[in-house]
Image (spheres, rainbow, N blue to C red):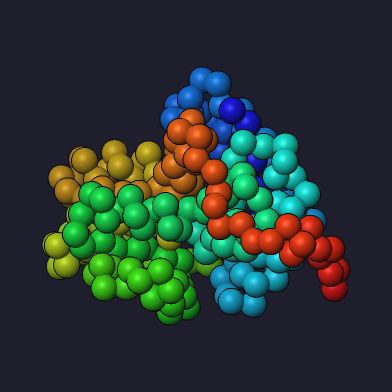
């Protein structure tokens, strides 16, 4: 099975690819191969609707070109930029981390939480949850008070903040499953789970990147196709370049 790991931002990723593969490897099927592709232009991170729409358009353009070479495509951003539109272009399964994480959490718990990046992310998360009819299931959305591009540089602060938020969500809201609201937090997921066990905080953390990749693997192995396709005339139409 060959999967495309699509990077929908223009931040520097060459140094992260090895870390990502090392993190994912224990969870992957032995026959799964992951290849990377990155949008050629756009914003370095997605933290607003404008960035989502612009980078999402770049994502769609890339999927239109590359989908025939892969068994499945994963778009690496918790906003799922362009994912719905990509499903109109390709029969190949296209998945983002957001919906996969939310549905996984709801399978595990009745009340779930999202740990987002900063205060602006709260409104963004509420809007996304409304769009897929899940807002009533999300009992709490709390930020770590970091921008996306600072997440990798503030490891000590981040782990302490995540622990504090997980404890608050469990104690104050009765939440038993929480989604990390940025795929950039992947590098700290194993440490976070170990610390949660040490401190006897009973909550399941959904790390959205590995979770979505496993979703995608399963879809491919079961032979699921993407059925949200539109007419061949629209799908084959030339994409305008601004």
Q: Quarter of the image for the C terminus: give it.
A: bottom right
Give the quadrant of residue 127. bottom left
Please say if 232 is above or below 50: above
| Residue 212 placement (x, y as % from top left) | 46, 46
Q: Is residue 239 left or right of 188 when viewed as pictured?
A: right
At which x and y percent is residue 40? 79, 56
The residue at 45%/58% (across/down) is 98
- Which residue is at a point 56% across and 57% down the rendered structure image? 228
The quadrant of the image that shows the N terminus is top right
Observer able to see residue 222: yes
**Viewer-side residue, 28 vs 180:** 28
Residue 63 left/right relative to 73: right
Q: Nearer the viewer, residue 110 or 210?
A: 110
224 or 103, nearer to the observer: 224
* Residue name at image x 26 percent, y 73 percent: 136
Q: Is residue 179 visible?
A: no
Residue 147: x and y, percent? 53, 67
Relative to residue 63, is residue 105 drawn left or right? Answer: left
Q: Is residue 65 left or right of residue 159?
A: right
In the image, is residue 75 above or below residue 147? above
In the image, residue 119 above or below residue 55? below
């Amino acid at each position: 099975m060959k999967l495309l790991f699509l990077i929908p931002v223009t931040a520097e990723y060459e140094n992260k690819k090895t870390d990502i593969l090392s993190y994912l490897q224990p969870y992957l099927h032995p026959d799964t191969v992951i290849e990377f592709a990155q949008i050629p232009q756009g914003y370095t991170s997605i933290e607003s609707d404008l960035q989502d729409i612009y980078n999402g358009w770049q994502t769609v353009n890339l999927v239109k070109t590359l989908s025939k070479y892969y068994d499945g495509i994963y778009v690496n951003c918790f906003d799922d930029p362009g994912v719905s539109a990509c499903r109109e272009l390709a029969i190949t399964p296209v998945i983002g981390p957001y919906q996969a994480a939310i549905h996984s959490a709801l399978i595990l718990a009745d009340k779930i939480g999202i740990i987002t990046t900063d205060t602006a992310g709260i409104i963004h998360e509420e809007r996304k949850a409304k769009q897929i009819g899940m807002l009533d299931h999300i009992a709490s959305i709390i930020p770590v008070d970091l921008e996306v591009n600072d997440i990798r540089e503030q490891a000590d602060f981040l782990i302490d903040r995540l622990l504090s938020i997980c404890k608050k969500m469990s104690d104050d809201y009765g939440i038993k499953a929480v989604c990390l609201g940025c795929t950039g937090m992947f590098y700290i997921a194993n440490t976070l789970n170990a610390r949660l066990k040490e401190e006897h905080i009973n909550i399941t953390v959904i790390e959205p990147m590995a979770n979505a990749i496993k979703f995608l693997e399963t879809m491919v192995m079961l032979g699921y196709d993407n059925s949200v396709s539109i007419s061949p005339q629209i799908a084959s139409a030339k994409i305008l370049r601004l």
